[in-house]
Image: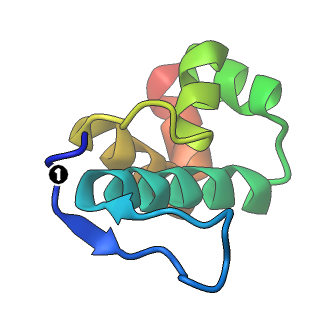
Amino acid sequence: MKNEPISLTADAGDPEDFDVSAEALDRGLKARTIRTVRTRLGLSQQEFAQRFRVPVGTLRDWEQARTTPPDFALAYVRVIARHPDMVLQAIA
């Protein structure tokens, strides 16, 4: 991790701030996308996970940027955002 390129340098005036690598920034942006889709649908993590058949632990890890969702999973979430009813019909 120490050898990763830094995308966002720490604020020198903030002793609690830290450098952010390109990979961590990407993971954080993907986490925000997933969380935003879920909250716009008005669903809790548990509800979203059950409705769209995503393990709730995996969803939590993605939303908290502990792990990076694979590209196919992010695409799935983007389709859910645009067509949630169609997705539900397809997985029923």
Q: Position of residue 83 (x, y in %)?
A: 52, 56
Outermost bottom residue? 13
Asked whether 14 or 65 is in front, the reply is 14
**Left or right: where does residue 69 sit relative to residue 12?**
left
Q: Position of residue 19 (x, y in %)?
A: 41, 64
**Residue behind mark 1:** 4
Residue type at mark 1: give it: Glu
Q: Residue at x 51, y 32 (%)?
A: 66
**Left or right: where does residue 28 sit relative to residue 57?**
left
Asked whether 31 or 1 is in front, the reply is 1
- Inspect this view and state whether residue 38 appears: yes
**Left or right: where does residue 68 sit relative to residue 16?**
left
Q: Residue at x 14, y 47 (%)?
A: 3
Q: Secondary structure at mark 1?
A: loop
Quadrant for residue 14, please give it: bottom right
**Left or right: where does residue 6 sit relative to residue 41?**
left
Q: How many marks?
A: 1
Q: Residue at x 64, y 28 (%)?
A: 60
Question: Is the residue 69 above or below the residue 81 in the image?
Answer: above
Q: Residue at x 24, y 43 (%)?
A: 71
